[in-house]
Image: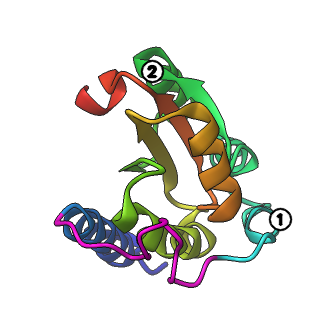
Amino acid sequence: MKSRLPRLSVVLAVALAASLLGACGGSSGDESGAVRASKPSAAVRSSAAVRLAESPAPLRANVADADTLAGEGLAGLKARLAKLKGHPVVVNQWASWCGPCRAEFPFFADAVLAHGDEVAFLGIDTTDDRDAANMFLKQIPPGFASIYDPKGEAARS
């Protein structure tokens, strides 16, 4: 049986690089915050569910909560990570006001579809307004669940 470790290492390295580059600044949209990057279709969640039907139950449950704020603060993060114990987790910190975050969400949606049966993806929406975050998730669904972290405590942990 061929090991999935090399492929998984590449996915994690690319995710880390995308997050680091995204933090360097710049804007992916115009002054209004409109996104110019192509966004994933509304079918991301159902496509992932079909592809992940045979994946471990915790990974399936994580995808079922996709595109929602599925917990709050440090307690919400700890609870979600406890459910995912034993599985690698890619954590993406984002906010609705972050231009680079908007640009990278389509990448993460594709990564969930390609590797969500091996890896959990989890977002931390930090120092953001809940209504703005929910609107952001509707506009650019990432295909993974997020923790609402208005005080930044989960992101600092």
Front residue (pair 99, 82): 99
**Is 36 included in the stretch rendered in magenta?**
yes
Residue located 40% across and 62% down the image = 101
Q: Which residue is mark 1?
A: 46
Residue 98 occupies quadrant: bottom left
Quadrant for residue 4, please give it: bottom left
Residue 73 — which label?
2
Vertical order, 70 against 138 (above or below): above
Above or below, 156 against 109 in this view is: above
Give coordinates of residue 140: x percent, y percent. 62, 65
Q: What's drawn in magenta, residue-wise?
A: 24-39
Secondary element type, mark 2:
helix
Q: Secondary structure at mark 1?
A: helix
Residue found at x 59% / y 26%: 71
Separation of residues labelled 1 and 2 (CA atoms) = 27 Å
Total numbered labels placed on residues in the image: 2
Side of 136 relative to 149 (left or right): right
Indicate the quadrant where residue 42 lies.
bottom right
Estimate the x, y position of residue 131 in percent, counting from the top left. 64, 37
Q: Which quadrant is home to the C terminus?
A: top left
Amino acid tagged 1:
Ser
